[in-house]
Image (cartoon, grey):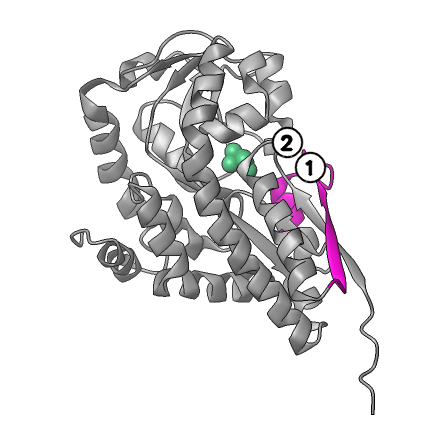
Amino acid sequence: MAAAPVAAKEFKIAVGDGAGGTQEALGKAFIAALEEESNGAHTATLFLNGQLGSEQDTVNDAAIGLLDFSILAINNVTPFSPSVGTLTLPYIILSLEDAVKLTQGPVGQELVENTIRDSGVRIIGWAYSGFRVLTNSKKPVTEVADLQDLVIRVPKNEIMIATYQAWGVNPTPMAWSETFAGLQTKVVDGQDNPYITVYAMKFDEVQKYITNLRYLFSIEPLIVSESVFQSLSEEDQNAILAAGQKATDFSEQYLREQEARIKEELVSRGMEISDPANDEQEFIDLATTAVWPKFYDSIGGIEKLNAALAEIGRDPV
Ligand code: MLT
């Protein structure tokens, strides 16, 4: 008997950032791979620039099956699945290699399972976007003291809020979809995000100074609604998982190829880049000693942090 024809699907993918960033690159690579893996049966469309809602809203929408896929920053998943906070502790990820190991090894696998359980979405791919550098419109920042009179926007993420508090400032939590307007109208002076994201969001139009902070390496998962995923045939599920892995591999390569070029492009558009004083030591000391212990419980215990540190060859705490 001939197999029943597969109903072609055109999935919707929400994307928090604008064109030209790692989120869009991951999304395009995923769509091409999905078409290939499903022999042309399925495709998807990207809705850039938060058209389908703020990044945190898209997690809710996917959880209840109103949205198929979303690409967003990991820090906007943490409020729904606190153990994912392991990946957003300040100065835990020190390189792209660490980010790849932590997302694609056993620690990452456990976080994928926890996220399905806690928030009804399944992470099926990862974009690697680079360290979140600090931008502001007022002055070069190289020391913690320089931050004190700046109003900095952060995502609604407890770990990032606590990190700025450890540096002595009370940051302003604001949805990603409102951030450009917040910077433009000077409700906030600055924010942090990777070079590629600063470029994709055209922040050079409203920000002047960049500080090369390395406190948080931005990882951006591609999530699928677990209820949508479970409604699909095993063959379609496998096509989605394989496409997610191909897009992840592409994203790693994309960051290696694009970050340096984009950094230069931002300088040519008039942005000024400074390095933190003394190899960032003051930022590092304040953030790790004050912030890590506060989140042992929410990430599932100190042993989860130690498992992550072991995976990237670092000493336990
Ligand atoms: C945020 O700052 O809310 C996100 O990291 C932005 C992004 O997804 O690029």
Residue 111 image position (x, y, % from top left)? 44, 61
Report the residue at 51% width, 59% height from top.
Answer: 245
Residue 193 image position (x, y, % from top left)? 47, 30
Q: Is residue 50 or residue 56 the one in the foreground?
A: 50
Contact between marks 1 and 2 (CB within 8 A): the answer is: yes
Picture quadrant of residue 237: bottom right
Is 67 placed left or right of 262 in the picture? Answer: right
The numbered mark at residue 199 is none
- Amino acid at pointer 2: Gly
The numbered mark at residue 48 is 1
Report the residue at 42% width, 56% height from top.
Answer: 83
Helix, strand or loop at mark 1? loop
Residue 284 image position (x, y, % from top left)? 24, 32
Residue topped by disc 2: 18
Measure the alpha-carbon separation of dots 1 and 2.
5 Å
Q: Is mark 2 within 8 Å of ligand 1?
A: no
Q: Is residue 237 visible?
A: yes
Quarter of the image where the N terminus is located = bottom right
The magenta segment: 40-59
Would you place residue 22 above or below residue 209 in this image? below
Q: Is residue 140 or residue 317 the one in the foreground?
A: 140
Q: Is residue 41 magenta?
A: yes
Is 106 placed left or right of 180 in the picture? Answer: left
Sort mark 2 into few (<14), some (14-19) or many (20+) by Cα contacts within 10 Å: many
Residue 98 image position (x, y, % from top left)? 31, 48
Q: Is residue 155 visible?
A: no
Report the residue at 69% width, 59% height from top.
Answer: 35
Picture quadrant of residue 298: bottom left
- Amino acid at pointer 1: Leu
Q: Residue furthest left?
A: 315
Picture quadrant of residue 7: bottom right
Sort mark 1 into few (<14), some (14-19) or many (20+) by Cα contacts within 10 Å: some
